Image (cartoon, rainbow, N blue to C red):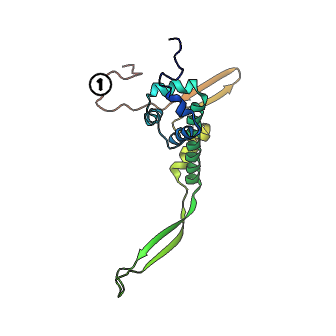
């Protein structure tokens, strides 16, 4: 395969290494597109995109930066829901009856509202940021020390098996 170009025979990779095309890749990643979708938008196979990412660091960087931006936006949105926030609701109200010229009166009504903190968002945040204190279904351990003897008790919540399931039950001594 001597003389083969690193990105493929058609050298399409050249066009995708320009500033404009790299920005487009970054935007697709920021919008949450999976790499298979980014590759389709580029007109290449996913395997080609994976190869290009290893050959051309600027392509890998564009995807990484785009995903990082959206991750920060999601984190900020989650934090906003955790803490609660104030927003302005805008309503456009059109009168029911037209005037003598056939026109309807229109007015804009603005109201400040408060969004209360979201308990589910708080739980997600704490489960991920402080899993030792807040993670659900974590294993609980109790350590008791008496002289040189150490007793360790692990309490693990067993998973329920659905009624009527076929097959053997794990951990059953029966």
The residue lying toward the viewer, choosing from 32 and 84, is: 32
- Residue placed at 53% from the left, 26% from the top? 52
- Residue 146 placed where, x, y %? 68, 25
Count neighbours of disc 1 (C-alpha within 10 A) and say few if under 14, some if 14 to 19, many if 20 or more.
few
> Quadrant of the rendered structure where residue 44 is?
top left
Does residue 170 appear left or right of residue 81 in this picture? left
The residue indicated by pointer 1 is 166
Numbered label tally: 1
**SS at badge 1:** loop
- Residue 64 placed where, x, y %? 58, 35
> Quadrant of the rendered structure where residue 164 is?
top left
The residue lying toward the viewer, choosing from 62 and 72, is: 62
Does residue 19 appear left or right of residue 92 in this picture? right
- Residue placed at 50% from the left, 26% from the top? 11
- Residue 129 placed where, x, y %? 61, 41
Quadrant position of the C terminus in the picture:
top left
- Residue placed at 48% from the left, 74% from the top? 108
- Residue 88 placed where, x, y %? 54, 66
- Residue placed at 57% from the left, 45% from the top? 125
User: With respect to residue 163, does 89 lie above or below?
Assistant: below
Most extreme residue toward the bottom, as rendered? Answer: 100
Most extreme residue toward the right, as rendered? Answer: 147
User: With respect to residue 79, does 166 lie above or below?
Assistant: above
Most extreme residue toward the top, as rendered? Answer: 2
């Amino acid at each position: 395969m001597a003389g083969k170009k690193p990105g493929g025979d058609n050298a399409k990779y050249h066009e995708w290494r320009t500033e404009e095309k790299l920005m487009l890749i970054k935007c697709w990643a920021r919008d949450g597109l999976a790499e298979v979708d980014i590759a389709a938008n580029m007109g290449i196979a996913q395997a080609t995109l994976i190869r290009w990412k290893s050959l051309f660091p600027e392509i890998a960087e564009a995807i990484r930066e785009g995903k990082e931006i959206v991750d920060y936006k999601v984190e900020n949105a989650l934090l906003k829901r955790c803490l609660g926030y104030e927003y302005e609701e805008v309503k456009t109200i059109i009168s029911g009856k037209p005037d003598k010229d056939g026109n309807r009166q229109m007015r804009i009504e603005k109201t400040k509202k408060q969004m209360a903190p979201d308990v589910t968002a708080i739980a997600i945040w704490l489960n991920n940021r402080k899993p030792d204190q807040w993670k659900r279904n974590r294993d609980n351990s109790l350590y008791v020390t008496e002289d040189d003897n150490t007793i360790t008790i692990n309490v693990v919540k067993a998973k329920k098996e659905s009624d009527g399931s076929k097959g053997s039950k794990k951990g059953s001594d029966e």
